[in-house]
């Protein structure tokens, strides 16, 4: 698919001819009803409408959906064509209604969209689920428009199947630089921490995210998928809405981000993707997780603001030093 020679610092993940052959046989196709054990941690290369009928009931803890938005876009061999709002709503409904039997009573559901498709997602999602929130995140990438505002935001609708659901707020705190470092009467930091990497406050996560970077060519997680979601974004949703060992299902897996992050965080996954090439990219990424579980922007069990790499490295070093001091202490005692 990629014939051009990559630039020197381009770290985008690619597939060689040999890898393409290797991974293209590793995704599966469903032709009869499946037990959970036979699909756990798999990539299913199929149209979601043909795969869903073979999936077991009530096995999904978290349903993450990143469907084609209502714009004309080419996904390798198949193009999605923009349609009017009503037709997009009907299209969303045609598959969302068929996914409901997969959910547990306490499942959470996230559906991604842009400003144009957001209202349709709200309408269709609220027909079946309880609406909890709408997250808006800033995408830094975006072309300026001469007669309009540059489009730099996306939405993720948060639904749940009932009023009982997992939400681990402590796991998704955002570490922010403290701009006004107030101190109490004893000169101790007030609600912030001072350490070798700087002055920070771990804050509760809000529904506006401006700490996300869209994967680009110098990032190791980048692939040639045209609408790949950032691993950091998935990490927030998975950590908030699942516990270790839970299962995350993605019916439009693309380059595999959901499965990759689920694996990095000790969750199980199942993903469905129509395109065989994207399935192979996902499988390669999943194999690489064995060697590297890092998620860019997530360090020390907290999420970091953009452009804080130096502080993250310092923090990593001081945690490393503290750990080796602790190990030496244990050895001595
Ligand atoms: C917006 S992209 C998902 C990107 C993904 N979140 C990632 O991080 O790479 C939507 C994906 O859905 C796939 N797709 C479109 N129609 C599909 C269908 N009917 N069944 C399964 N996959 C489909 C496309 O090939 C595309 O890769």
Image (cartoon, helix red, strand yellow):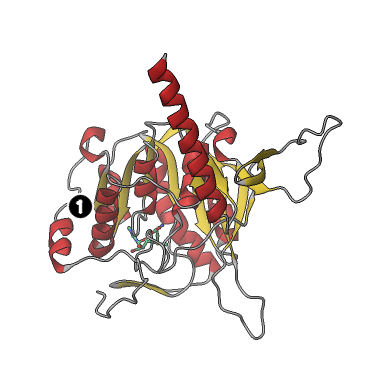
- Name the residue at 51% across, 56% down: 112
Q: Secondary structure at mark 1?
A: loop
The image quadrant where one finds ligand 1 is bottom left
In this rendering, position of residue 322 left or right of residue 94: right
| Place of residue 260 in the rendered image (x, y in percent of width and height, measured from the top left) | 35, 48
Res 38 → quadrant: top left
Residue 322 against residue 144 in the figure, above or below:
above
**Residue corresponding to mark 1:** 27
| Place of residue 190 in the rendered image (x, y in percent of width and height, measured from the top left) | 77, 35
The one of 144 and 102 positioned closer to us in this rendering = 144
In this rendering, position of residue 124 left or right of residue 193: left
Q: Give the residue furthest to the right.
A: 185
In this rendering, position of residue 249 left or right of residue 55: right
| Place of residue 243 in the rendered image (x, y in percent of width and height, measured from the top left) | 45, 31
The one of 19 and 309 positioned closer to us in this rendering = 309
From the image, which quarter does the N terminus lie in? bottom left
Q: Give the residue furthest to the front.
A: 332
From the image, which quarter does the C terminus lie in? top left
| Place of residue 305 in the rendered image (x, y in percent of width and height, measured from the top left) | 60, 53
- Name the residue at 48% across, 51% down: 232
Res 255 → quadrant: bottom left
- Name the residue at 47% across, 46% down: 235
- Name the residue at 60% across, 72% down: 151
The one of 192 and 326 positioned closer to us in this rendering = 326
């Amino acid at each position: 698919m990629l014939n051009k020679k990559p630039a020197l610092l381009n770290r985008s993940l690619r597939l060689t001819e040999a890898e393409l052959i290797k991974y293209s046989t590793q995704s599966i196709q469903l032709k009869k009803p499946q037990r959970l054990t036979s699909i756990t941690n798999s990539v299913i290369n199929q149209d979601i409408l043909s795969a869903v009928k073979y999936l077991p009931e009530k096995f999904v803890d978290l349903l993450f959906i990143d469907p084609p938005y209502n714009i004309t876009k080419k996904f390798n061999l198949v193009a999605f064509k923009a349609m009017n709002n009503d037709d997009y709503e009907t299209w969303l409904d045609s598959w969302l209604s068929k996914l409901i039997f997969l959910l547990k009573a306490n499942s959470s559901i996230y559906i991604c969209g842009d400003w144009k498709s957001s209202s349709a997602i709200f309408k269709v999602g609220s027909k079946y689920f309880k609406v909890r929130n709408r997250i808006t995140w800033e995408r830094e990438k975006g072309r300026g428009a001469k007669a309009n505002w540059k489009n730099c935001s996306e939405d993720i609708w948060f639904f749940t199947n009932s009023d009982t659901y997992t939400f681990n707020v402590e796991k998704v705190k955002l570490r922010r630089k403290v701009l006004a470092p107030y101190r109490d009467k004893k000169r101790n930091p007030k609600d912030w921490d001072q350490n070798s990497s700087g002055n920070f406050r771990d804050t509760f996560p809000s529904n506006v995210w401006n700490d996300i970077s869209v994967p680009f060519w110098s990032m190791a997680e980048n692939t040639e998928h045209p609408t790949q979601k950032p691993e950091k974004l998935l990490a927030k949703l998975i950590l908030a809405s699942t516990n270790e060992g839970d299962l995350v299902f993605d019916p439009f897996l693309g380059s595999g981000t959901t499965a990759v992050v689920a694996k990095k965080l000790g969750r199980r996954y199942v993903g469905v993707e129509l395109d065989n090439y994207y399935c192979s990219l996902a499988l390669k990424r999943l194999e690489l997780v064995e060697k590297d579980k890092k998620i860019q922007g997530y360090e020390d069990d907290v999420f970091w603001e953009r452009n804080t790499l130096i502080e993250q490295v310092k923090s990593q070093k001081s945690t490393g030093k503290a750990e080796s001091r602790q190990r030496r202490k244990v050895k001595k005692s």
